[in-house]
Image (cartoon, grey):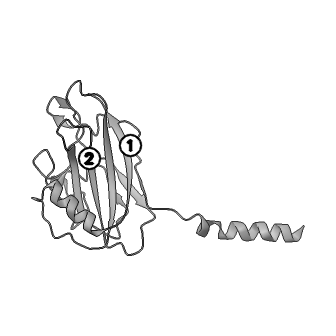
Amino acid sequence: MKKKYRLLIFALAIAPGVFSQTFTLKSNELGGQATQTQVFNGFGCTGKNISPQLSWVGTPAGTRSFAITIHDENAPTGSGWWHWLIFDIPAGTGELKADAGNPAKGIAPGGAIQSTTDFGQPGYGGPCPPEGSGIHKYTITIYALKTEKLGLDSKANPALVGFYLQQNVIEKASLVFYYKK
């Protein structure tokens, strides 16, 4: 009987190492649907345009910085719509607070760069799909990168940022939410 208990205690002791956390993106604010807090304020939408709180765990070895993007693959443009691109987030960071996507507020981590979105300016732009275009899928992706800096600035367009992300990614994780106008 003692042998069984020792085996059980041993199994429980090593379980955290066996079941280690994978690279995972989370949000305390987002559920499956965008709320008026995240929705854009303009183009016929009347949301608050506040970027969601995001956090991550299980950072892969060798990570030197992070980047986060939000993309709407259902936008009727042929290439989707980029709602947020923020990169050069320092490796020691584990969270972006709500409204970090507003460059004027200075909430984003020091050194992080927010580049031009499909709204034509840097920073977060929330969901605001065209009326009658159905349910849109918004994918938030965090990239663990092998470089401290991408070497880009706030004028970099989404395609260029995406190219640099793909050249430097170690691992990535995503979460999805939806919105219909």
What's the amino acid at mark 1? Leu
Q: Secondary structure at mark 1?
A: loop
Q: Which is nearer the eye, 148 or 75?
A: 75
Q: Is residue 149 above or below residue 173?
A: below
Residue 180 appears in which quarter of the rendering? top left
Residue 88, visible in the rendered structure? no
- Which residue is at 25% across, 53% downward? 100
* Residue 87 percent coordinates (x, y): 24, 62
* Residue 125 percent coordinates (x, y): 20, 44
* Residue 16 percent coordinates (x, y): 61, 66
Determine which residue is flagged by label 2.
Answer: 71
Residue 78 appears in which quarter of the rendering? top left
Taking the image as shown, residue 17 lies to the left or right of residue 30, namely: right
Taking the image as shown, residue 63 lies to the left or right of residue 155, namely: right
What's the amino acid at mark 2? His
Q: Secondary structure at mark 2?
A: strand
Tag of residue 21: none
Determine which residue is flagged by label 1.
Answer: 30
